[in-house]
Amino acid sequence: MFVFATVTICIAMAVVLIRLFVGPTLYDRVLALNTFGTCTVLFIGVVGFLFERPDFLDIALLYALINFVGTIAVLKFFRYRRLGDSREEREMIMETPQTKQTAGDLR
Amino acid sequence: MELALTLFLFVALVATAIAMAFITRLFAVVILSGVFSLLSALLFITMDAVDVAFTEAAVGGGISSILMLGTIALTARTEMKQGKFSLIPLAVVFMTGSVLIYGTIDMPNFGSADTPAQQYVGLDYIKRTPKEIDVPNIVTAVLASYRGFDTLGEVAVVFTGGLGVILLISGLGRRRSRNRKER
């Protein structure tokens, strides 16, 4: 049964990888990255049971956390175009014309 | 089953690397590099090296992709057009790869018990840890007790590096000079 689950997760990972390679817009790729992280978590859990080391389940939880932080960082970047600065510096950088791009050219 | 899993993961890894070489949108490349390190972490897990895998996922998938996103925020978002196709880098990569593969020929098989690394010091640590340190994890005993001073030095080096990076990117100098101008 765990073998079947592993094979299914592998197929899901392959499909997500194809979406990552082809993905026309960036949002597809971000979503694919998040889905791939979820697949990773499932894979670690199932492989732990497959190789009879169920303690891997705790490690899978840590991967879920990393996946969450990574996705939040990417999305925050999309929203604000920067990653964590003080407000005055953001204003200072906003003055340069380079950052005045709209969300339309994200492709 | 394990062989099939390893093969699948390696094929996915190579496909990701090739895609990274061809895609010119740097966002996509950053995301693909995160996937690359997740895949290599999965490979480490199938080899039972869970701690290495976790380091790979945290550093490669987490920190370094965030750092690369920050770099993209400060620079350009698409790759510059490459001029002509040059053979020299390809040749260098192939030579390095073949040298590395040549180096693996001498190595013992994966998981074999009669290698030098498994026989002398390792056995000693395994024997002595339960009665000397009394920690269930032998790696922890080695890092924090047998080589405690070593680890302390490493931690000091990492702390200094982190301090330097924080001082560099916090923009303290910029803020100070602006304050001086205002006065």
Image (tube, rainbow, N blue to C red):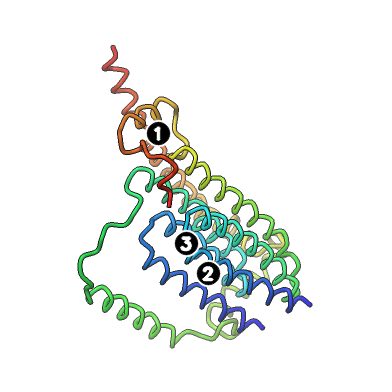
Residues at marks 3 and 2, CA–CA distance in whole angstroms: 11 Å
Query: In the image, B107: left or right of B81?
Result: right
Residue A28, percent across and down? 53, 57
**Residue receiving disc 1:** B170
Tag 1, which secondary structure? loop
Residue B28, percent across and down? 44, 58
Tag 3, which secondary structure? helix
Tag 2, which secondary structure? helix
The quadrant holding residue B2 is bottom right
Residue B134 visible from this viewpoint: no
Q: Amino acid at mark 1?
A: Ser
Crowding at dot 3, Cα within 10 Å, few <14 / some 14-19 / many 20+, comes out as: many
Subunit ID for the residue under disc 3: B
Q: Amino acid at mark 2?
A: Ile
Subunit ID for the residue under disc 2: A
Q: Is residue A85 above or below residue B130?
A: above
**Residue receiving disc 2:** A18
**CB under 8 Å between discs 3 and 2:** no
**CB under 8 Å between discs 1 and 3:** no
Query: In the image, B28: left or right of B138?
Result: left
Q: Earlier in the sequence, mark 1 or mark 3?
A: 3
Q: Please name the residue shown 49% across and 72% down the image.
A: B13
Q: Amino acid at mark 3?
A: Leu
**What number is the disc on residue B32?**
3
